[in-house]
Amino acid sequence: MTSVYIIANPSSGQGKAIQAIAELLKLFHEEGLGPLVKLTQEESDITEYAQKACQAKVDLVVLVGGDGTISHFMTAVQDYDYKPVVGIVPTGTMNNMARSLNIDQNPKKACKQVLQNQAQAIDMGLINGQVFTSTISAGSVPASAREVSQEDKEQYGALAYIINGLQSFSQGQDECYKVLLDGVEVQLNIDLLVIGVANSIAGYTDFFKLATYTDGLLHLFILKEAPVAEKIFAFSKLLAEPDQAQDLSQFAQDADVNSYMTSFKDIKIDLLNKEGQVTMDGNPGPSFPIHVEVIPQFIQVIVGD
C-alpha cells in the first residue's frame, strides 16, 4: 500500500470526524505513509474525490463520516473498473454498514482497524440504476424518519428515528403497492417496506439476522397496514424471532399475518394509488416504480474482527 486518500465529512459526529482524521494521520505516518486529506462540504465533493481516486488508482480510500458519505462514494465509483480498497471510520448517527461489517463504533478504534487491512469483497444494492449501501425503505415510518431534524439527530442519535417511527404507526397512510418477486405479483396495502443489503437496519444489527454483505442476496421485510396494536406486535415479533421465508402470494391473502420476510436477488415494486419515493441510506431516494437488484462483490472493504 503506497497511496492513500482520506475523504472526510468534517461536520460529522460533532467533532469526531476531525479527531479521527488526526488519529489516521498519526497512524499512517508511523507506517511511513502520507495520506492526502480531502474534506467534503457537499455531495459533489465526495463524487469528485471518489472519481479522482479511481482514475489515479489509489490503493486505499478511508471514508470518515456516516452512511450518507459511504453511499455517495459508492455511487461515484459505480462505473469504474478499478475501485480502491475502502476503509471506514464511522462518525454518523446510524452507521449501519460499519455495524454490519464489525467495524468499531469508536472512531479511534476504527482507525486502528483500517491499518490492519483485512479487506473483503462485499455486495451492494442497485435501485433504478443507482447504488445503495445499506437500506431502501418506504411507508409511513421512513417518511417520518426523513422529518427528523439535524438537531434531534445530534442530541438523541438513533433514538430520534425510533421516536418518530413509533409515532407514525398510528398514522394510516393507505398506500397500495404492487410487488413482483420471483415471478409472483401481488397487490397489498403496506405500512412499512424495508430492503436491506445486510443485517443492520436503523442501527439495529439483528433486523435481518442471517444477512451479510457477502451472501449475494438482498433482504425484504413488509409490514401490512393493520391496527396499531397488531403492527407493534408484528414488529416486536420480528425483532425477537429468527428470519423465516414465507410465500408472498399466501401472505398477501392471509388477513391474520401482518409481516413478511424473505431474501431475493431481483424485485420490482410500484406505488399504485399516489406518487411517492423511497428513503435510500437515510436520504430521499428514487420515486416509484423501482427496480431493485443485488450487485455481488461490488468492492473491497476493510472489515472488523
Image (cartoon, rainbow, N blue to C red):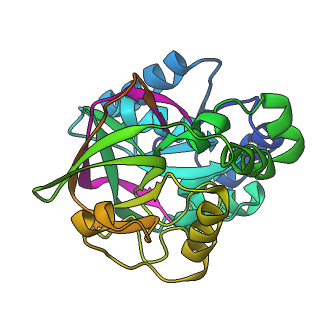
* Residue located at (72% from left, 46% from top): 161
Verify whether residue 211 appears in magenta.
no
Give how far across and how far down residue 121 sits, in percent. 33, 61
Side of 236 where 284 appears, left or right: left
Residue 10 vertical placement versus 134 (above, below)? above
Residue 38 vertical placement versus 188 (above, below)? above
Residue 30 vertical placement versus 19 (above, below)? below
Side of 63 where 259 appears, left or right: left
Give how far across and how far down residue 254 sits, in percent. 34, 68
* Between 304 and 114, the one nearer to me in the picture: 304
Main secondary-structure element of the magenta-colored stretch: strand
Side of 2 where 172 appears, left or right: right
* Residue located at (60% from left, 56% from top): 227
Give how far across and how far down residue 1 sits, in percent. 44, 53
* Between 143 and 95, the one nearer to me in the picture: 143
**Quarter of the image containing the C terminus?**
bottom right
Picture quarter containing residue 54? top left
- Magenta highlight range: 278-305
Give how far across and how far down residue 141 sits, in percent. 60, 44
Side of 196 where 56 appears, left or right: left
